[in-house]
Image (cartoon, rainbow, N blue to C red):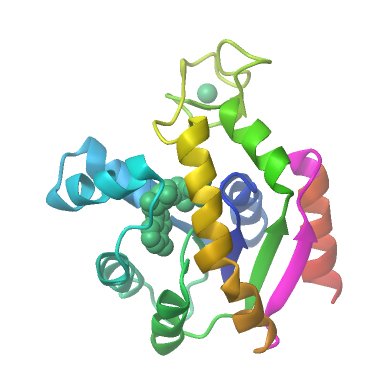
């Protein structure tokens, strides 16, 4: 199974990907994570991407498409994966269509104001990658590790990421609906509740 996870920043794509990975044994490909890893390793790709990420803008299509093309070329035809954070523009979606067949596109729907609330309090564990709320925890509730906040999770950058989502990525809803691939999920509430909606829809339709 090959899935695309679609949704505004902070809609919970990464969190749901972890659940889906366990249940369906799918590889998790997050373009944001790949950029952040490159930045940590100070590669030219990471340094190039940083300019855009800090501003809440999209990394140019050509750069992202090349990176995704290289990543997907390592998968055998029978290996499943989830794309998290790609595609984000119609151009990227067309590129993906030329690369591989996608079985479903899950759109996680959350109102903008809930997104801003989530992201301004989002923290990630340095040891295990668990995502949690900084107002509720001072250390990672699952391993005790130190929590950090993403550089782009400040209100100004969040607003521009949301704007980019509405201007460029939301068009993919129609793109995929017209291809009969769209699965819309109410992504408000606790991660476990959202995941049970995903399972219900994916496995009973
Ligand atoms: P979020 O979905 O919370 O905004 P991501 O981790 O998916 O976070 O992405 C972080 C940043 O990485 C984006 O704001 C953007 O700058 C860059 N990025 C990730 N994926 C793409 C993509 N497909 N196209 C362009 N830029 C991307
Ligand atoms: Zn942890």
Question: Is 188 inside the magenta-drawn segment?
Answer: yes
Residue at left offset 41%, top offset 75%: 92
Q: Nearer the viewer, residue 58 or 82?
A: 58
**Extreme residue in the left direction:** 44
**Magenta segment: does it hold 194?**
no
Q: Quadrant of residue 142?
A: top right
What percent of the width, then of the height, locates residue 139? 55, 12
Locate residue 15, reporting x and y percent.
Answer: 61, 44
Q: Is residue 179 left or right of residue 125?
A: right
Q: Is residue 104 above or below residue 16?
A: below
Most extreme residue toward the top, as rendered?
Answer: 138
- The quarter of the displayed image where residue 199 is located: bottom right
Is residue 167 or residue 140 the one in the foreground? 167
Identified at 19% across, 51% down, the residue is: 48
Up-down relation of residue 154 to residue 113 (above or below): above
Q: Nearer the viewer, residue 78 or 154?
A: 154
**Relative to 136, is 192 on the left or the right?**
right
Q: Residue at x 67, y 56 (%)?
A: 23
- Left or right? Give the position of 86 relative to 134: left
- Which segment is the magenta one? 180-192
Tell me if I can see residue 65 in this picture: yes
Of residue 166 and residue 21, the one placed in the foreground of this image is 166
- Residue 187 in percent (x, y) is at 76, 51
- Tell me the quadrant of the picture where the N terminus can be found: bottom right
- State the image coordinates of residue 4 (x, y, percent, origin top left): 56, 68
């Amino acid at each position: 199974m090959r899935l695309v996870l679609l949704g505004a920043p902070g809609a919970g794509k990464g969190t749901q990907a972890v659940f889906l990975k366990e249940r369906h044994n799918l590889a998790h490909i997050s373009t944001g994570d790949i950029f952040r890893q490159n930045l940590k390793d100070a590669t030219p790709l990471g340094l190039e991407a940083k300019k855009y990420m800090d501003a809440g803008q999209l990394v140019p299509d050509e750069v992202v498409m090349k990176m995704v093309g290289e990543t997907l070329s390592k998968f055998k035809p029978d290996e499943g994966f989830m794309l998290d954070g790609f595609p984000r523009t119609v151009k990227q979606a067309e590129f993906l269509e030329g690369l591989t067949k996608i079985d479903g596109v899950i759109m996680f729907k959350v109102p903008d104001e809930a997104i801003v609330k989530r992201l301004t309090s989002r923290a990630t564990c340095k040891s295990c990658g668990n995502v949690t709320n900084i107002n509720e925890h001072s250390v990672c509730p699952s391993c005790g590790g130190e929590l950090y906040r993403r550089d782009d999770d400040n209100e100004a950058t969040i607003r521009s990421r949301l704007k980019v989502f509405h201007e460029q990525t939301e068009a993919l809803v129609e793109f995929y609906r017209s291809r009969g691939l769209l699965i819309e999920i109410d992504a408000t509430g606790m991660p476990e509740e959202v995941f049970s909606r995903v399972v219900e829809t994916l496995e009973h339709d």
